[in-house]
Amino acid sequence: MAESNVLGIAFGNSNSSIAYINNEGKADCIANEDGDRQIPSILAYSGDDEYHGFQAKAQLVRNRQNTVANFRDFIGKSFADIDPTHSAVSAHPVDTNGTVSYDIPATGKTVSVSELATRHLLRLKQSAEDYTGRPVTGAVLTVPTDFTHAQRDALIAAAKAAELNVLQVINEPVAALLATDAIQDGGKVSDDKTVVVVDLGGTRCDASVIASRGGMYTVLATAHDYDVGGNQLDDALVDFFGKEFEKKTKVSATKDERSIAKLVNQCEVTKKTLSASTSATVSVESLAEGVDFHSNINRMRYELLGRKVFDKMVALVQDVVKKAHMEPFNIDEVIMVGGTSHTPKLASRLSAIFPETTRVRNPTASATSLNPAELNCLGAAVQASLIADFEQTDIEEATHAVVTSAPHIAKPIGVLVGDEFVKVIDSETAVPARRTITLAAPTTPGPVYVAIYEGERDVKVTPAPPRESNNDEEDSDYEEEEPEDFREPIIKPSKKIAECVFEGEGKGKVEVTVQVDKELQATIMARAVGGKEVVRGVVGK
Ligand code: ATP
């Protein structure tokens, strides 16, 4: 049997990345033969040659009609269902009997989206084989959470045609969270936490709320914005510099497709530079009508130009938190994913909508932060290594969607101690699950009463202390902000589901165990620590 060499592949509209498990057993991102780890998902044709990645991206300036870009979202869709907006700068999709394809003048052929996906995956597989020096034995692919079954099936079929053995297709945000837990946090099964994964890409932005309970992930809510992404930030710069060029030279940089393509390329480079530096230069030879363009911009100006785009990205995150019926303070962690997450302003804007207790993981948060553009493929590689040795039948089952969305408990279950709800099992815990807590009990022997409740998320508002009036200031124009009430998340008991009385041993401790099976039936056990008597009850869903 061939030695296992499994990959994680993140196939984006803009870029793809591949990760493998290195000799030390760690997931690592692979560079293709050009040295790129973010490989543009672009194919270009000229004569008999096929270009891929950055080489194909370079063809967008001179050979646009033979260059196919931004096609991942078209996989498995009919022509009537696609939005070709992002094809404006490349070859345009055409309707072939209701399916999506491209006419390539250089080859005289019409090529379908599935065939392009196969070619792209084949090139990625070849790069991985060159890099690792071994044949690839399987791969886990990531897709956005809104990919339909038909799209997943079409992607698997395209991979099979590239002789790529698909072990599993997993959701992008789950992969990113897995990479963070397994690699960034060294594989420790972290405490229960609720996480927002925000993927800021080139053509679109996606956000999800995921509950992580005992190492199991459950996607609670998702939100997508197909009209916002890094490309809009490039466009803001193109608009700004286009006007400046025209003002300086009286020549338009936006009339001719080739000039636009050149300016777009340069603006993307400038934008990336502004993520790392506070100023950047712009230089395009022969931008239009043979006239060169040289200019510069500082980060502050860029952040003003991009403000509307940043607003939409922040709104997407607020929206997904709302969709999960939560408030920002219910979120323990935010993981920023995707190339656009390198933008410093976005890290500060997102941090501002969450309280200090929420950890916002972004590339500048720590020196050991993983590259946000690599999180999806790294997580997929970790998953691939976990399931690489599964039997074929298990693998086939694992590609089935059910495995990736486990049933979970809707409401927390806990014990009422005085007025306080003490959580035993959190909401959104995937089932089957079992949790035990130990509580203080009387230190003298006698009956102990335990009441088990279902809880409900609530907010405790502590009014801000009234501002001391200062007569001197009353007349002044200076308006001090009203102090804000203090809000904190609490769980309030909503429904009693069981109660029991047993003989306490007087040792000062009782143990309560709640176990919920796959059918959401709960078994509750309570006993005095050190005592023999166990009270057990079963509660239906
Ligand atoms: P999508 O599917 O939304 O098109 P993707 O997942 O294919 O996205 P990513 O590589 O995550 O693509 O994101 C690409 C975007 O990230 C591009 O707009 C690119 O310009 C931007 N980007 C990459 N690096 C940086 C950087 N250092 N600073 C700012 N933006 C960056």
Image: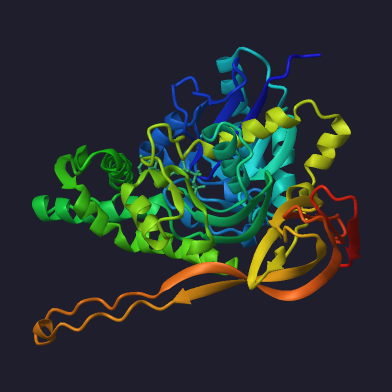
Determine whether, in the image, residue 65 is placed left or right of residue 176: left
Q: How many marks?
A: 0
x%, y% of residue 101? 61, 47
Percent coordinates x, y for residue 311 in the rendering: 37, 63
In percent of the image, x 53 and y 73: which residue is there? 459
In x, y percent, where is residue 115? Answer: 65, 38
Q: Quadrant of ligand 1?
A: top left
Foreground pick, 177 / 122: 177
Q: Position of residue 216 (x, y in %)?
A: 70, 46
The C terminus - image quarter: bottom right
Residue lying at 23% horizontally and 39% vertically, measured from the top left: 277
Horizontal relation, residue 376 to residue 473: left or right: right
Foreground residue among 243 and 450: 450
Is 75 placed left or right of 15 in the picture? right
With respect to residue 524, does 532 lie above or below? above
Quick one: quadrant of the N terminus? top right
Quarter of the image for residue 183 reads: top right
Residue 26 visible, this angle: yes
From this view, report whether residue 132 is shown above or below residue 282.
Answer: above
**Residue shown at 74%/69% (left/top)?**
454
